[in-house]
Amino acid sequence: MRSARRNLLALTTAGAVAAGLGATAYVSAPAAQAKQPAAASKHHPQKPTGKPLAGLRILISNDDGMQAAKPSNSDGLGLYELRRAMCAAGADVVVMAPWQVQSGKGTAVTNGGVLTAQRRTALPKGYENDCAGTPSGSPVFGVCVADGPCGKDTPSATPADTVKLALRGGLKAKAGWTEDPDVVLTGINSGPNIAASVNDSGTVGAAVAAVDQNIPAIAFSAEGDATNTLFPVQTYRATAEFGAKFLAGMRQNKLLTGKFAVKVDYPDTTNGEKVRPPVWTRVGNGAAVYHDYEQKNGGDSFDITMGLCEGKLSSGGECDESRKDADQVWLLEKNHVTIAPITWDRTYGTSIDGTRELRKLESYVKHGAPRA
């Protein structure tokens, strides 16, 4: 068994004990930002450039935040790689992401108070000019829960908050977009979102928030390295470049739909194994890691810890995986890119309103999707 399952443990632990934010330059939202050029609408696309995503407008969010300050690359660096790849393919991109790490928030929302979308003016080194010349200027916003500027310790909006805010007025106010984005992308998450982890994932939760409003959405996640401490730029970049090609193919084949979200998990590229082609999967019904709770001194308090499913995925109990087409089997044991559809409708036994679209996408993944 590969060490990928331990990467999941490293990911979840990193999210649970996220440290303070790095020093980064920001400005609050001055009125001058309203003067940015508005993105072209769906009906008046930007001039053709010959690039596969030209004219496409993309909202990006995640659950790792947008700070990208940690040496482990676990706090949002994947978001900047995704932004870079989409702009390079010709898209107009706006980022509206949680202010701080929000791993494990699922579809949680903030029910009261004030949200502030604060623009980041100094992007991480090496990513400053990735989207130069796009119609919107491709701003990056961090969203916090505050009636005023976001600071080092300001509580963060959830991933679902950021997408709902963006689609319900935030993009119009902050980027000049008067129509919905063509697609919402979430991630790239620091670590895979597979099996039981899917229900906890804020990356997937943000994508569900988009399809809740009938906006096509794709959630991207990537494995960490074999040391359990680093999420390599190399893997983020491979994921992002695959993602741009995958999205271009979906667009070309008219597969973008708001009836369900698409979940993409990408293997580690630094373990010496060949990354294998994308596979159509289901969400696994077992667990790779799980939350556990240890009582402290027989009292009222419990430490939150992470349980790890060692050995084979068929080890029994909570760790048992019975689906041969499970995402975790094909990602962790076979090193394939895995793709699975995610629906917002949790009604058991209900036939989905999108069977035709689902079958066409499955065929594309099996026969036409880019190789990893």
Image (tube, rainbow, N blue to C red):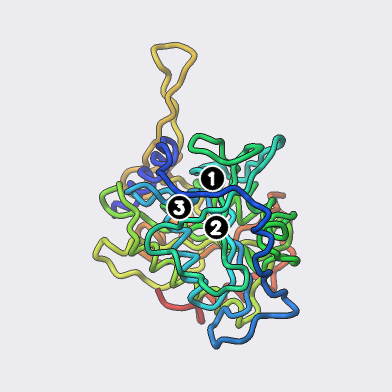
Q: Name the residue under label 1.
A: 99
Of the residues shown, which amino acid type is indicated by label 1?
Answer: Trp
- Helix, strand or loop at disc 3? loop
Q: Nearer the viewer, residue 301 or 141?
A: 141
Q: Name the residue under label 2.
A: 140
Q: How far apart are marks 2 and 3 (CA)?
A: 12 Å
Q: In this view, does 226 lie above or below 258?
A: above
Q: Nearer the viewer, residue 306 or 166?
A: 166
Mark found first going from the N terminus, 3 or 1: 3
Position of the C terminus, as image quadrant, is: bottom left
Query: How many C-alpha atoms fall within 10 Å of the one at disc 2: few (<14), some, or many (≥20)?
Result: many
Q: In this view, does 46 lie above or below 221?
A: below
Q: Do the residues labelled 2 and 1 touch (CB within 8 Å)?
A: no
Of the residues shown, which amino acid type is indicated by label 3?
Answer: Gly
Residue found 52% across the figure and 53% down from its top:
120
Q: Do the residues labelled 3 and 1 touch (CB within 8 Å)?
A: no
